[in-house]
Amino acid sequence: MAGRLGSDGTHWVRTAVERFQGPLTLYATRLLGDPDQARDVVQDTFLKLCSQDEARIGPHLAEWLFTVCRNRAMDVLRKEKRMAKLTQAAPPERPAVEPPPGEALERRETLSQVVGWLDNLPPNQREVIRLRFQNGFSYKEISRISGHSVANVGYLLHAGMKSLRGRMAEAQI
């Protein structure tokens, strides 16, 4: 077992947790809209990492983590959808993205407006934009994480950014 987890049995996993816990939690929160569920998904992701071979996962650790996290988040969303149909309840509301109370800075207001527009993009465009600009992944890495072809990633980024630019121009930002 020590060979699977690194020299001390947990070093590489601890390093991965320290480096990726924040970005994965942000990513999962954006996908799920619920920070508590996001933390559970990230925890599941790291638990799954513990059973993996460092030599196999190591070269593509970030992609592997974001892919597992995304797949787990999609599982949670599918389960919620099934449960909502069973109970005939309305889906949970997602919190609005607003600046903190009393915040009067124009930059914050503009950022809030852009994030609102981003949240209104189709989910696949929103996801690839966040993977690209919040997490710095390449088109190829986004392709492997999201399951879209590299060409489709490029198209989704282009279409999403064009939509955001159009809204910014209308708002004269």
Image: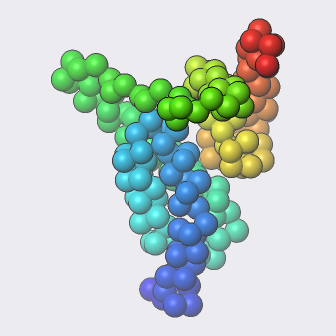
User: Which picture quadrant has residue 88?
Assistant: top left
- What is the tally of numbered marks visible in this picture? 0
Residue at x 59%, y 54% (from the top left corner): 23
Left or right: where does residue 106 sit relative to residue 40? Answer: right
Residue at x 41%, y 66% (from the top left corner): 47
Residue at x 58%, y 75% (from the top left corner): 15
Q: Can residue 148 be seen in this view?
A: no
Residue at x 49%, y 82% (from the top left corner): 10
Question: Residue 137: where, in percent of width, then height?
Answer: 73, 49
Left or right: where does residue 158 sit relative to residue 74? Answer: right
Residue 104 against residue 51 in the figure, above or below: above
Left or right: where does residue 96 sit relative to residue 117? Answer: left
Residue 124 against residue 21 in the figure, above or below: above
Q: Can residue 107 be seen in this view?
A: yes
Residue 151 against residue 133 in the figure, above or below: above
Question: Residue 116: where, in percent of width, then height?
Answer: 59, 23
Quadrant location of the C terminus? Answer: top right
Out of 95 and 34, give the one closest to the viewer.
95
User: Which picture quadrant has residue 112?
Assistant: top right
Question: Residue 48: where, in percent of width, then height?
Answer: 44, 64
Quadrant location of the N terminus? Answer: bottom left
- Residue furthest top in the image: 170
Colour pattern: rainbow
